[in-house]
Image (cartoon, rainbow, N blue to C red):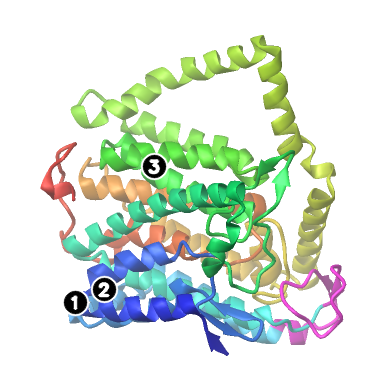
Amino acid sequence: MSIEPIGIFTVALGLVCLALGYRAAATVFIVMALFGSAAAILAGSANVQPAHLFLLFLAIAAVQSGARRTVVLKTLSFGQPGFWLACLVVYGAVTAYFSPRLFAGITQIIPLGVSEYPSSGGTVPLGPVSSNLTQTIYLVADLVCFLLIVAVGSSRSGFQAIVNGLIAYAAFNVVFALLDLATNATGTSDTLQFMRNAQYTFHDNDTVNGMKRIVGSWPEASAFAGTTLGAFGFTATLWLCSRRLNWTGPLSLASLMLIIMSTSSTGLVAAPICLVVLYATALVRSGVDRGSRHSTAVVLLAPPLVVAAALIVLLYQDLYNLVHDYVDLLVLSKSGSASGMERGSWNTYGLGNFVDSWGLGVGLGTARTSSFPVALLSNVGIPGMMFFLLFAFAALGSRRDARRTYEADVALAARNGCLCLLVGAMLAGATVDLGLLFFIFAGLASCRTASAEEIMVPAVPLRGRPSEA
């Protein structure tokens, strides 16, 4: 086991944040979740990412207050989102150990980690794999992350620190994407190796028809596009609600453009679905008051603009060919490509694993798939699927606030961030772990569920007021 330079930096930053307080720790933790291709600690074939290491410092900073500890315990009570997520974690951990052993050999799996059989890139008989442990650890980290975000968000200043952290996350995500493009164009990609030291398979120099596949701070374009969908959904919703306009408008537009340019099939298919989600949000959020003007403008102008854009593409043959070739390469012909057929076979075997295990799953972290629902069914079965759905409903679907306060608008943005991440995961999710960003959004969306006190930020003016900072 060795600690990497970025790990030393993470520890130093964590100690500084302990001195500054839980709000600084929460903001920095959210930004650290951006380093998806970095390893703070290398332990054999396992990687401890900077955000997972920093989670320890956030926990120390957050639970020093008795009030925040009470919020954590309340979130874990029966019927609350933390309870259902904890059930998923416990069931997943049990299946991770027992299922591959109890059902050993009854089905063929696409192993997520290293198995006892020689690696051939194909199927192996069901049995324990190295990722049973790592995926359990990741899911435990997701639970801890969710609980801590709810606890931090139970105070006015903590709630605002989380919002600031998510806006900073979106901003740094754009910066790293631009750095990825710039360093590739100038032949200086080695300057980003400090955050590409994890033991993953990297695709940071891949191209599609001469276009650089944008990976940013992630190992591959699909991971970059998938996480950027969440940042886009969050910032675009805040812009629709006329919140933090100087940041949310430019960041949402830049995020959407980067998703389209990333050459990721996941991003290209998911982006229109996310736009539909945002248009539905604009319909609900539109009105005649000043705070609804962006939503109203989108509702009125988006349909004619879409029609006009489609007509322009159809009328200009060169432009039509360019758009058609791009979409055909990444989407229409994807299913017939080697990568598309491989991913399709992962889902086929995953569904077979679900059936062969009598609906109980072959164990958390055992089988690789290419769709989040299939990953749930194949790894943790019907019980795991039910626990996740109960968690999602409790965190995202209950107690929606119809008032147009700052807190209600942020909660709406966080829910849309989760939905956009789920859209990407449904198209290309390989594991049950949705990543820390999803649970940060879910925690922010359910802060009021965990606390009965009216402690949130009140409605704020539209621009340039200290209360929005």
In the image shown, does 181 or 271 lie closer to the viewer? 181
Q: Is residue 69 left or right of residue 188?
A: left
Residue type for callout 2: Val
**Part of the protein shown in magenta:** 99-125
Which residue occupies 44% across, 22% down? 302
Which residue occupies 52% across, 67% down? 195
Residue 274 location in percent, x, y? Answer: 51, 39
Residue 65 location in percent, x, y? Answer: 19, 80
**How many labels, in total?**
3
Residue 120 in magenta?
yes
Residue 407 location in percent, x, y? Answer: 23, 50
Residue 466 location in percent, x, y? Answer: 12, 48
Residue 372 versus residue 18 in the image, above or below: above
In the image shown, does 434 or 252 lie closer to the viewer? 252
Which residue occupies 70% across, 72% down? 361
Residue 93 visible within the image: yes
Dot label at residue 379: none
Dot label at residue 251: 3
Q: Is residue 284 left or right of residue 293?
A: right
CA–CA distance in space, label 3 to label 1? 34 Å
Dot label at residue 67: 1
Q: Is residue 320 left or right of residue 2?
A: right
Instruction: Write down the residue under mark 2.
Output: 71
The residue sitting at the left extreme is 466
In the image shown, does 69 or 314 lie closer to the viewer? 314
Which residue occupies 64% across, 71% down? 380
